[in-house]
Amino acid sequence: GAKIMAAGTEAAPITFTSAADPSALPMRGLWGGVIVLGKATIAGGPTDSIEGLPEGDGTYGGTDDADNSGTMQYVRIWYGGSVIGQNNEINGLTLGGVGSATTLDHIEIAHNLDDGIEFFGGTARVKYLSVLFCGDDGIDSDQGWRGKIQYAVVVVGKTGHHALEMDSKTGGDLDSTPRSRPQLYNALLIGGSGDPASVSSDDQVKGIARLREGTAGEFGNIVLANVPGKAVLHADCGSETHSNAATNPDDANTLWFSSNNLIVSGNALSTLFDSCGGALSTAKVATSSGLLLLPSNLDQSSKFMDFRPGVSTSPVYQNIDAVPADGFFDTVTFKGAMDKTNWMAGWSILSEAGKLPADITGESLSGTITASKTLSASTTYLMTGQVFVKSGATLTIEAGTTIYAYGDDGNGAAPALVIEQGAKIMAAGTASKPITFTSALPASQLPVSGAWGGVIVLGKATIAGGPTDSIEGLPEGDGTYGG
């Protein structure tokens, strides 16, 4: 019956964080978390006591699926998940029996010791959700949650467990009612880079999406990347039906995992599923996501990332699932969490740490240029990696052009423009139309030094100690100069 009215903005987000000395951060489990309890229907009800609080202190559940617990927008929950007893940890954001009239958008949970966000029954709906580097699962559902999520980024990190853990079983009954039926569309699920070390899981099996214990649901336009072991773990099935078709059967007792979902992996499709009787066994598989910058071992130590598509030929633009026409979901033309708009820029913990670019849309620059090329002032450029202009090629940059450089290429190298021996750069700006090489960081993170590499021009003139040498700032052999 209480409400939270927490309406932040991109420029002024609301932050729940630890009072610990900043030098100790990031660290998990430094405080509890945020718990919202509503009156919507739950399995095993009509009511129950929420985990993380003493018995009787957190009643949730009821019969009002349109219950309104208030508003949370641009809310950040960092460093929580304190253990208060054996098998009793607090999630970053716990939603118990929260109803569909509650407004939840632009929510971030980072560095929580237990799950990032957990739904216990109810019908809560979330748009624009980021869950980063939590100790157990990113998104967890239980007790008949029948809510919706669109646009989610879940990064497991080095020692987290699953990006998704979707359950339904209540009181030992795999067919308890209401059956959980999460509807998740447009999510980027990034697997862990190390061995799970969850303090609360019943096992440490590697996998990105764990669907089990009789859950139904709809999972469409999903991208699963950096797969540790299995992409999909599906076990403990009840009497629900299962569909791996390209078309959503739209049934409350069916678990549908679209065959159009994209798994980014070099492994064979047959190795990526572990499912009840092979009920779920197919998806699109690609060796590259086509995203602007997705480090292959993305974790807390990664220096820079960008979850938007980099090219129009990216597989995230192919075989798109239709979303439910229910007034909540937006019609989309892409898989994953983002198209051109970087909705995490400016307010995410990644943005504050200088690991995300500003919401700048442009053409990606990276790799080698072997034929003459012109950069147009009418186009914005994103230098996502090191660019080498090879001998015989001329790079012409029109007056007024701006090149925004990322802080890292995903492999530890700082993006830089290198004009090799025999190549030329023709960058004739003017006083009114200068040519600018600058950082892609949000304006709120600037000025700062060392935000990208630089510009290196290598010629054939005489040098002391020559005739040639390797330039500093590049690996030996990548920057020969002198003559």
Image (cartoon, rainbow, N blue to C red):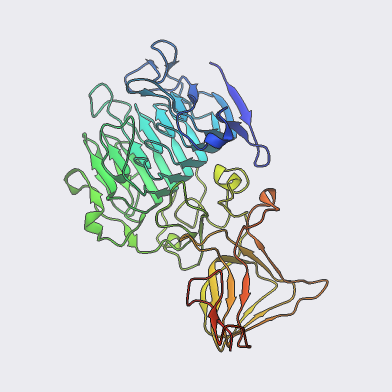
The quadrant holding residue 363 is: bottom right
Q: Is residue 124 above or below residue 241?
A: above
Q: Is residue 354 above or below residue 33?
A: below
Q: Position of residue 448 (x, y in %)?
A: 67, 53
The quadrant holding residue 175 is: top left
> Is residue 344 visible from the viewing direction of this image?
no
> Is residue 407 visible from the viewing direction of this image?
yes
Farthest residue toward the front?
Answer: 465
Number of callouts in the render?
Answer: 0
Q: Position of residue 208 (x, y in %)?
A: 33, 46
Q: Does residue 182 appear left or right of residue 235 in this picture?
A: right
Q: Does residue 415 appear left or right of residue 442 in this picture?
A: left
Residue beneath the point at 69% across and 48% down: 444
28 or 94, which lies in front? Answer: 28
Q: Quadrant of the C terminus?
A: bottom right
Q: Is residue 137 above or below residue 444?
A: above
Farthest residue toward the top?
Answer: 56
Q: Position of residue 126 (x, y in %)?
A: 50, 37
Q: Position of residue 215 (x, y in %)?
A: 30, 35
77 or 308, which lies in front? Answer: 77
Farthest residue toward the right?
Answer: 431
Residue beneath the point at 49% across and 59% down: 293
